[in-house]
Image (cartoon, helix red, strand yellow):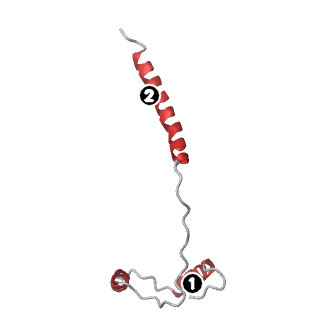
Amino acid sequence: MFPHKPRNLIVVALCFCIAVTSLGPLALAQKKTAPVEATPPPVNEQFKFGDVDLEILNQADLLDVRLERDGLVLADEAANAYLRRVGKSLIPPGLAL
């Protein structure tokens, strides 16, 4: 009785999708935010670990112990030397750790 109705529904759905996807970038482009300014680090203040920092450090230490205990630490000197070289190549020149 309505042979063209499913086709019309598909055409309407496609037009709706095209309209929605073309309006998204316009709405995002109109949003303006204030520029973010970096705050310079304090000049003469000594860095102190906070409670959260110390808790994360403690968890990392516990994880290290667990990984070593379970035998999941790679103890291959050649692989470790390679990883050190790769890691050092990622550090900018003049930045010593």
Nearer-the-camera pick, 85 or 62: 62
Q: Position of residue 70 (x, y in %)?
A: 33, 82
Residue drawn 53% across and 75% down? 39
Earlier sequence position, callout 1 versus callout 2: 2
Q: Which residue is mark 1?
A: 84
Residue 61 relative to residue 12: left or right: left
Nearer-the-camera pick, 67 or 59: 59
Tag 2's secondary structure? helix
Tag 2: amino acid: Ala
Q: Position of residue 21 (x, y in %)?
A: 50, 38
Residue 8 falls in image quadrant:
top left
Tag 1's secondary structure? helix
Q: Position of residue 54 (x, y in %)?
A: 36, 85
Q: Which residue is mark 2?
A: 13
Return the residue found at the far top: 1
Nearer-the-camera pick, 52 or 70: 52
**Quarter the C terminus occupies:** bottom right
Return the residue found at the far front: 34
Residue drawn 60% across and 82% down? 88
**Crowding at mark 2 (Cα within 10 Å: few <14, some 14-19, many 20+):** few
**Crowding at mark 1 (Cα within 10 Å: few <14, some 14-19, many 20+):** few
Residue 82 relative to residue 56: left or right: right
Residue drawn 40% across and 19% down? 6
Choose mark 1 or mark 2, whichever is in front: 2
Tag 1: amino acid: Arg
Residue 88 relative to residue 48: left or right: right
User: Which label number is shown at residue 17?
Assistant: none
Return the residue found at the far right: 93
Residue 73 falls in image quadrant:
bottom left
Above-or-below relation of 87 to 37: below
**Quarter the N terminus occupies:** top left
